[in-house]
């Protein structure tokens, strides 16, 4: 009787809740993917603004000069890097130790 109806209603409700949770996970994953792409795009813009001579890499001097610019410091800070850490950041980004940071090193290192 009434318990059978309640079981059916409960089953329908639970199925609906499970479907909503699946959609919510998909939305969260998509948002995270879009956020990563946006950050990568901003990092490329930042690299281009730091790369004064336009050779596609950042030298230690270009990086040091960029740290004197407020918008660069604010962006690095927005990524969760303290300014004191930013002083050491170039050495960490220069993975191959050649004295310059290329696009791949920059984007991968800053994420």
Image: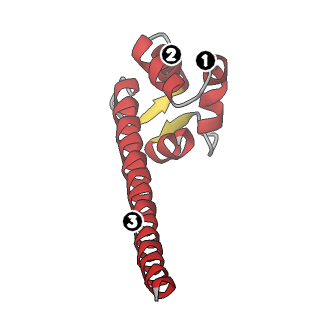
Residue at image location 43% in from the left, 48% down from the top: 36
- Mark 3–mark 2 distance (CA, rounded to whole Å): 42 Å
Of 26 and 37, nearer the camera is 26
Q: Residue 78 appears at what percent x and percent y?
A: 49, 26
- Mark 2–mark 1 distance (CA, rounded to whole Å): 9 Å
Q: Residues within 10 Å of mark 3 (few under 14, many from 20)?
A: few
Question: Does dot 1 land on a helix, a strand or a loop?
Answer: helix
Contact between labelled residues 2 and 3, with CB atoms less than 8 Å apart: no
Residue located beneath label 1 in the image: 83
First along the sequence among labels 3 and 1 = 3
Q: Residue 88 appears at what percent x and percent y?
A: 66, 25
On the question of residue 56 being in view, the answer is no
Q: Residue 61 appears at what percent x and percent y?
A: 52, 19
Question: Does dot 3 land on a helix, a strand or a loop?
Answer: helix
Numbered badge on residue 23: 3
Contact between labelled residues 1 and 3, with CB atoms less than 8 Å apart: no
- Mark 3–mark 1 distance (CA, rounded to whole Å): 39 Å
Of 56 and 3, nearer the camera is 3
Question: Does dot 2 land on a helix, a strand or a loop?
Answer: loop
In the rendered image of this protein, does residue 63 appear above or below residue 30? Answer: above
Residue at image location 66% in from the left, 23% down from the top: 85
Mark 3 or mark 2, which is nearer to you?
A: 3
On the question of residue 35 being in view, the answer is yes
Numbered badge on residue 67: 2
In the rendered image of this protein, does residue 21 appear above or below residue 61? Answer: below
Mark 3 or mark 1, which is nearer to you?
A: 3
The colour scheme used to paint the residues is secondary structure
Contact between labelled residues 1 and 2, with CB atoms less than 8 Å apart: yes
Residue at image location 41% in from the left, 36% down from the top: 43
Residue at image location 48% in from the left, 87% down from the top: 4
């Amino acid at each position: 009787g009434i318990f059978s109806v309640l079981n059916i209603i409960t089953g329908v409700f639970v199925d609906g809740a499970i479907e909503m949770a699946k959609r919510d996970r998909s939305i969260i994953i998509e948002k995270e993917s879009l956020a990563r792409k946006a950050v990568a795009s901003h990092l490329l813009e930042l690299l281009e603004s730091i790369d004064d001579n336009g050779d596609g890499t950042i030298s230690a001097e270009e990086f040091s000069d960029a740290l004197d610019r407020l918008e660069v410091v604010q962006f690095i800070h927005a990524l969760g890097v303290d300014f004191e850490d930013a002083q050491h950041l170039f050495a960490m980004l220069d993975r191959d130790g050649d004295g310059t940071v290329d696009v791949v090193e920059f984007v991968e290192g800053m994420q």
